[in-house]
Amino acid sequence: MSDENLPYRPCAGVMLANRDGRIFVGQRLDSSSEAWQMPQGGIDPGEDAEEAAIRELGEETGVHGGLVEIIARSKTEHFYDLPDHLMGKMWGGKYRGQRQFWFLMRFMGEDSDVNIATKHQEFRSWRWAELDELEKLIVPFKRQLYRAVVEEFRPLV
């Protein structure tokens, strides 16, 4: 099967905005690059995208659903393809990339409520970033997706 015939992995992503309009980004543990990303992950069987987004947020940041208010859901799914050097290595080689619904959530807690030292820790550090920084912080193959998510949610942040 060629890479073009592989499906996209169904996922949900979270743009978590604090009260000042800054966005949570985490630096992945499994990468030696300086790339940062917003929380995101796969949708499990039997889950809808919103449930997956809240679960992933908790798993990656320690922030539970009671500390957020969902502001918006992306109007469409956003897609990205893995670069050639990662194709066949990620997700057991079963996917060519990801298809993601994104959620804008307002963080109603305090910074002390964020705890990235979770059971299955994914981030080595975290910070609040400006909306216009996000595209520059992410790995190059996800920049177009981040640009689209930022532009969709910008008026609501």
Image (cartoon, helix red, strand yellow):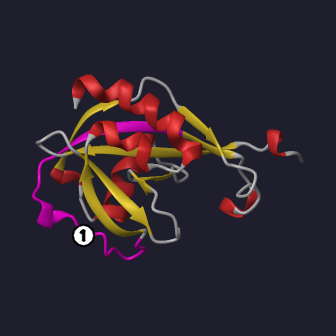
Q: Residue 108 at what x, y percent from top left?
A: 12, 48
Answer left or right for 71 relative to 75. left
Q: Which residues are magenta?
A: 100-121
Give the residue number, with chain letter if any, for mark 1.
115
Q: Is residue 102 magenta?
A: yes
Q: Is residue 140 visible?
A: yes
Front residue (pair 132, 94) = 132
* Image quarter of residue 111: bottom left
Q: Quadrant of the C terminus?
A: top left
- Which residue shows up at 36% across the image and 63% down it? 60
Q: Is residue 80 magenta?
A: no
Q: Where 112 sits versus 66, above or below?
A: below
Front residue (pair 19, 105) = 19
Q: Where 125 sits versus 56, above or below?
A: below
Answer left or right for 110 relative to 26. left
Q: Secondary structure at mark 1?
A: loop
Q: Where 69 sits versus 92, above or below?
A: above
- Which residue shows up at 43% across the image and 23% down it? 75
Q: Residue 125 at what x, y percent from top left?
A: 32, 68
| Residue density around tag 1, few if under 14, some if 14–19, many if 20 or more, within 10 Å | some
Q: Residue 99 at what x, y percent from top left?
A: 58, 39
Seen from this angle, which residue lies furthest right? 1
- Which residue shows up at 41% across the image and 32% down it? 149
Q: Residue 79 at what x, y percent from top left?
A: 58, 35
Name the amino acid type tagged 1. Answer: Asn
Q: Across the whole image, how many numbered discs are drawn on residues?
A: 1
